[in-house]
Amino acid sequence: MECRSNAPWPSGHPDRLITSNSCDNQYDEDTVAGYSYPSKPATGNPVEIYRCSGTANGTHWVSTNSTCESLGTNEKSLGWMLTK
């Protein structure tokens, strides 16, 4: 699920985040961002996905890297996706 912050943000650019199940506190549901498996699938080529938070500006993004490309903090696992 994609969620948008309901707190006022500078420059009119609200923070968005991707999460599983329901939006965090002070965030409202925006749209369904896609689907993931809650546990690692037994077949296919599964990759774990993570919700990351930027250290400098507090923004969020999704990564397949548990260290968030060294650009921020891993907040939680969002589940698993299948790749080719």
Image (cartoon, helix red, strand yellow):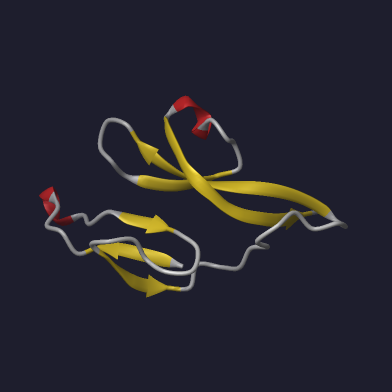
Residue 53 sits above or below residue 6 on the image: above
Residue 30 sits above or below residue 56 on the image: below
Q: Which residue is drawn at 63% across and 63% down?
A: 36
On the image, the x and y values in percent for residue 65 come to 59, 36
Image side of residue 21 versus residue 8, left or right: right
On the image, the x and y values in percent for residue 16 come to 33, 57
**Count of all numbered marks drawn on residues in the image:** 0
Q: Dividing the picture into quarters, in which one does residue 38 lie? A: bottom right
Residue found at the very far right of the displayed protein: 43
The one nearer the camera, 16 or 74, is: 74
Q: Residue at x 48, y 73 (%)?
A: 32
Q: Which residue is drawn at 25% across and 37% down?
A: 57
On the image, the x and y values in percent for residue 8 come to 11, 57
Position of the C terminus by quadrant: bottom right
Q: Residue at x 57, y 35 (%)?
A: 66
Residue 51 sits above or below residue 70 on the image: below
Image side of residue 82 versus residue 77, left or right: right
Q: Dividing the picture into quarters, in which one does residue 7 lie? A: bottom left
Q: Dividing the picture into quarters, in which one does residue 78 lie? A: bottom right
Residue found at the very far top of the displayed protein: 70
